[in-house]
Amino acid sequence: MNEFETLWSKVLESLQDEIDAHIFDTFFRDSYIYAIKGNKIYVATSSELAAKIISQKYSTLLDTLTHSITQTNYELLFFKEDVLKNDKNISKKDDKTFFKDSKLNPKYTFDNFVVGTSNQEAKQAALIVACSPGTMYNPLFIYSDSGLGKTHLLHSIGNYIKDNNPRKNILVSSTSSFIDEYINGARGEKDLNSLKSYIKTFDVLLIDDIQGLVDHKKTEAYFFDIFNYFVDNEKQIVITCDKLPSELKGIESRLVTRFSQGLLTKISAPSIDTSIEILKNKITQNGLNIANFDDDALKFIAENKSNSVRELEGALNKLLSYTINFKPTTHVDLKTTIEALQDILNIKDVNTELSEKRIINTVASYYGLTSSQILGQSRIKAIANARHISMYLIRNILNTPYTKIGKIFGGKDHSTVMSSINRVDKLCKTDKITNKVIHDLKVMIG
Ligand code: ADP
Ligand code: MG
């Protein structure tokens, strides 16, 4: 529904309670708002007769109903559709429309939102609000670092209400679009009063990234009024933010207080297990089979990218496009994953314990071994060799103390570790193959 349809459906809904059903069907059923110019609303009707009857008998009632919905004094004018179409002064082109780009993203639903301890509370609160908008937590304030699912939950609320409660009209907007609308209004390109009236016709207001309001004092005051109207009238507001209200420096305290009066709920970074679930979910959504992805490959991505679901998704997309474009394969293993992602994984940046593990995993996959074989006690030459190379790389890349390396490899003495590493170091200088292996592995590790 566009804004005219939203408004007119509300007017008609209230009108239906006031007049005879037969009259309603005959004269109003096909009417719609053709244009709004200043304070004039041009309504198109299906016949001359309808236009005439409505103007004579119902215009006062309709003005009143429209006023109670928009809180603006509009004058309603009724014409047969053709008359409006032929009138050049009322062209539809320069109709003022607000929030042109506002729409719910159908991709974001509760069904495809993977739940773990990091987001369970936020998801529950969102679902409660979606089931009974305006009555439980108002506003619902969802905050988290970037990329952890705020926008996803915000749109899920909207999509859920749209499907289950279609009479509720939903306005979803980023704070930056809200500010743009305000600025257009303030410049006189559009009308600030009509904008406010328009927003007030909605039942649910979903505002993304409210931190954008900082340093926009006038928009803030304007928003404050709308916010109060919604809360006072039990119309639901949901707000997302990258921080707590109290941390929003530069926002008036009266607004901060009001933001905090409903429910504040946080989304944290997902655990490794939740990240793996999210990856599996995205793989299935892409029409692929999870069975084709090795567990250690998914775990590898999750361990590297768990602080942002957006980055997690980005890594998966990169992997998928790599396997399609460069290395067509149906089976995705750890080695392919590391190859595909090496330039977006800054392995040296993550904490050392993970990196040591990762070096071992990389070496293991390079040699077609498992990491437990490398960490074990086997004296088979190929395994022992991979083990020494792992130790060498750990020392070389992370500068991990010999004693710690000894501990990682099942409690080896530091002098044993040292001599293994020295041996690889020598080989590296004398043996071309070893040199190449070390070089390749370093590239893979990043
Ligand atoms: P934010 O608004 O907090 O920056 P988004 O809602 O835009 O984050 O989420 C970033 C991406 O991660 C989106 O594509 C979203 O679908 C996805 N995402 C986030 N959390 C989850 C989750 N729990 N389950 C599935 N996908 C998620
Ligand atoms: Mg967002």
Image: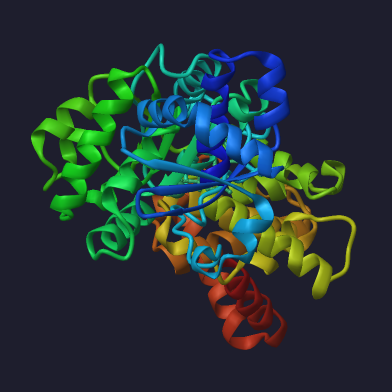
| Quadrant assignment, res 381 | bottom right
Q: Is residue 330 visible?
A: yes
In this orientation, which residue lies closer to the viewer: 162 or 301? Answer: 162
Q: Residue at x 26, y 64 (%)?
A: 188
Colour pattern of the rendering? rainbow
The quadrant the N terminus occupies is top right
Q: Image quadrant of ligand 1?
A: top right
Residue 424 x %, y %: 58, 72
Q: Residue at x 24, y 50 (%)?
A: 213
Seen in the picture, residue 71 relative to 219 is either above or below; the reply is above
Residue 412 x %, y %: 51, 45
Seen in the picture, residue 344 relative to 410 is either above or below; the reply is below
In this orientation, which residue lies closer to the viewer: 87 or 305? Answer: 87
Q: Is residue 260 left or right of residue 385?
A: left
Q: Residue at x 60, y 75 (%)?
A: 443
Q: Is residue 390 left or right of residue 23?
A: left
Q: Residue at x 67, y 44 (%)?
A: 48
Residue 54 x %, y %: 56, 33
Residue 55 x %, y %: 52, 36
In this orientation, which residue lies closer to the viewer: 403 or 327? Answer: 327
The quadrant the C terminus occupies is bottom right
In this figure, what is the number of numbered marks? 0
Q: Is residue 377 visible?
A: no
